[in-house]
Image (cartoon, rainbow, N blue to C red):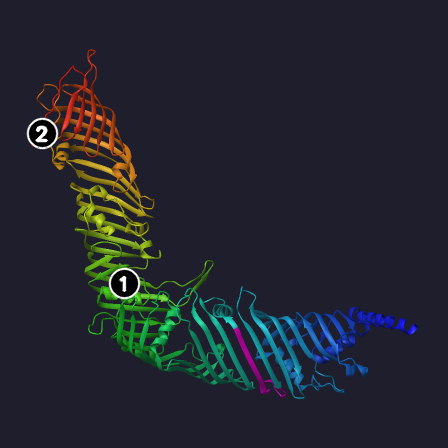
Amino acid sequence: MKIFSSKPRAVLAGTLIVLALFLLHPGATRLKSRVITSISASVGRPVDLSSVHIRLLPRPGFEVENLVVYDDPVFGAEPMIRASEVTADLRLTALLRGRIEIARLDLTEPSLNLVHREGGYWNLGALIQRATHSSLAPTGNATAHPRPHFPYIAGSSGRINFKNGPEKKPYAFINADFALWQDSEDSWGGRMKAQPFRSDLNLTDVGQLQVEGTWKRAQMVRETPLEVKLEWSRAQVGQVTKFLTGIDKGWRGAIDITASLSGSLSKLKISSTAAVDDFRRYDITSGKSLRLAARCDGEYSAETHEFHQVLCSAPVGDGVLTLTGDVGLPATNNYVLSLKAEDVPAIGMVLLAERLKKGLPDDLTAEGTLHGVLSLQQSGSESVARWDGQGEIANFRLTSEQTKAELGPVNVPFVILDDSPEGRKRAKVLTKIRTGAIFPKGAHFEFGPIALGSAHATGASARGWLNRSSYNVVMTGDAEVARTLRLARMMGFPAIAATAEGPAQLNLQIAGNWTGAESSQGLAFAAPQITGTAKLHNIRVTPWGMGDPIEISAEMQLAPDGVHVRKLNAKAASTTWSGSLDMPRGCGHPESCTVHFALNADQLALNRMRDWVSGRSKSRPWYRVLETGRSPGTSLLARLHGTGQIHTSRFVVHEVTATNASANLDLEAGVLTISSLKADVFGGKYRGNWEADFGASPALCSGSGNLSGVLLAKIADQMKDGWIAGTASGSYELKGPCSGDFWQSGSGTLQVEMRDGVLPHVLIGDDPAALRVTRLSGTGQLASGKIEFSSAKLNSPSGTYQISGSVSLNRAVNLKMTRIPIDGTHSGYDITGTLARPQVTPLSNTEQARLKTPAK
């Protein structure tokens, strides 16, 4: 019974003891100096720490706080390693012999400083060299040994900083897990997994870097035999360029780099592969996925800091790009390189262009092969590099069914020049065939001339240059506008949305930059800028969505700040135009820019102009010229922005003709404003302002104006019925829908004054003479297709009358003439019928009236 009861107590006691060994970490102040000595002997550097606690389970050891491993003073005063928490496991075989020896050091969130000083030395290299010269036993040797063992050193979630002397660089590795150990008597190993980081930039998707290697004992660091494998994966191109240069260049894609290094630092063989999947510009998301890949081999010498026997190859279809030569580190400015292209298919260059240039058609295809050689060399004593090379794209042909364009087949020669004496000599020879372009100083790539005519015709040609940051292409000669516009669309350049035919004399420059600019609004690639001159001769242009074509002859200048059209002569809507146009640049699409114009027209027929703008050819009543008849946003008026002056000798609205007409026009956001409208009409003067809002549904029109000195007989003649004569003046304010029922749906106020007039069809009483009007004045209200008069006043030799009633726009009359009382007498007349056939009846029996029927 006692035995049975003692077993649970024993188990409980044992459990409590084990738990205590896990949880209780008693201080080890007396052992602190021995722990410091042991760690310092293991790493070969002075060490300090703030406190030590004993840990018995799961393995005997110490828990150390605030560990500091000091660096060699020649590399600076800052410690090499800092770690707030460190676990030091003891080697059991040494502990059984009464000796404290560190078997493993686990550093939590350590900070490691890698320092480079003059002469190419690194503090980590010095540490490794000291370790290789020490008499430490291998890390994994479990047998007892009189010599101390090299500990297994591991760090987790650490940070590795880089310093150049006392200066700390912004480059670092974060989330770093690393380990260091001694494999055997003569070899060591290490590995690291970390994320590249820059303290001065906000970076994402920089990928993960993994390094694993081994090295052996040697007398000097540069003679140390080593084997290293490196992998940089899941990195994004834009973030990598930002990490290396500080600027996101605007390119996208996933980078994978692998490399293997073997040998010694004095002669290190390197074999590497690099690939970029889905390479593209940041703002290009469509198109075929593009993979760039290359393999490079070579040797590196730490003594000369140079790469020798470099051989890089990148297959492209059935061809290959090959880079060979020797190259020093960037700071040495010492390299000799040669790039050779053999049978590289032109379609490969097109696929690359589709990922670099926005706006290229999806079905762009190419034929031809690229052959060429490029050499680049510079010695440390030379201030600039020397470039040389030449080649050709043979039988180059570019087609696109989408844009209905074709270029070639042509041979495209190219040459690489620089500012060296040889380069200047070659440039002097080329000057004889260069046209138009101003070629840059420094190394650049020149190509052309390229014939832009069809396979069976000659005409304009193009040549140009490009360097590491920008490009410039010059087009000169006589060209067919239609073909030139199709080629422009195929090349991804903006072109007017119109069908154009006819010849033009071109002298154009197309220039731009390769790299994107990073700003607070994000990345932006500036669109290529087209400048120069174009002389147009009888060009027939049909803007999309419009009617008959425009015939244009003009001189056009494309300046950096705007497009200027001078000596303009055009025919559109049976009208001959002349004048000038100016349009600013940099406002996006051409239809988004405000056109400034000063135009003269020999005659302008409103109904024909409206039919032409809307694309309609059938005739319509004149009062429907304002009707859009198109869905919102599709009409020309809804797309254009313009302001300026217009003058015409004859302005025709249906059968009404005004002469010497002029106005200021402003079209913005679908609102057409016509101000200072002036014209001579019916022998008088017209002044007015109108506004049409085509953005409203339905479109709304409003206007005001006045007429003076109008000869009413001319109006009667226009109506083919001499129902009125005299002179008149008046004013109006009107508004309503801009449609065919404007006069039926519109409303407004009219004021009219008539003098010295006659109404031939109106006879009053027994007087055989027509009604003469000394003066008539009044105000009318337009509504529902009628003009209502409430208090008009008519003075005539027969008396003075108050006029009320209405006159409809279809010429129906319903008026009442009431004589103003004289001596208590009241009389008047009802006038009904039409303007051509009025019926006059007395209001009472005080007077007689009769109808005079106009002669047929």
- Point out the stretch of residues depicted in magenta: 216-233
Task: Name the residue rendered at 36%, 78% in the picture.
Answer: 420
Q: In this view, does 48 lie above or below 525?
A: below
Across and down, in percent, residue 602 comes to 16, 48
Please, which residue is most extreme toward the right here? 2
Q: Mark 1 points at which residue?
A: 532
**Is residue 421 among what the camera can see?**
no
Q: In this image, 240 relative to 597: left or right? A: right
Q: Nearer the viewer, residue 314 or 534?
A: 314
Q: Per the image, is 218 magenta?
A: yes
The C terminus lies in quadrant:
top left
Q: Dot 2: few (<14), some (14–19), or many (≥20) neighbours within 10 Å?
A: some
- Residue 198 visible in image: yes
Q: At numbered mark 2, what does the secondary structure look like: helix, strand or loop?
A: loop
Residue that badge 2 annotates: 854
In the foreground, 149 or 60? 60
Amino acid type of disc 2? Answer: Pro
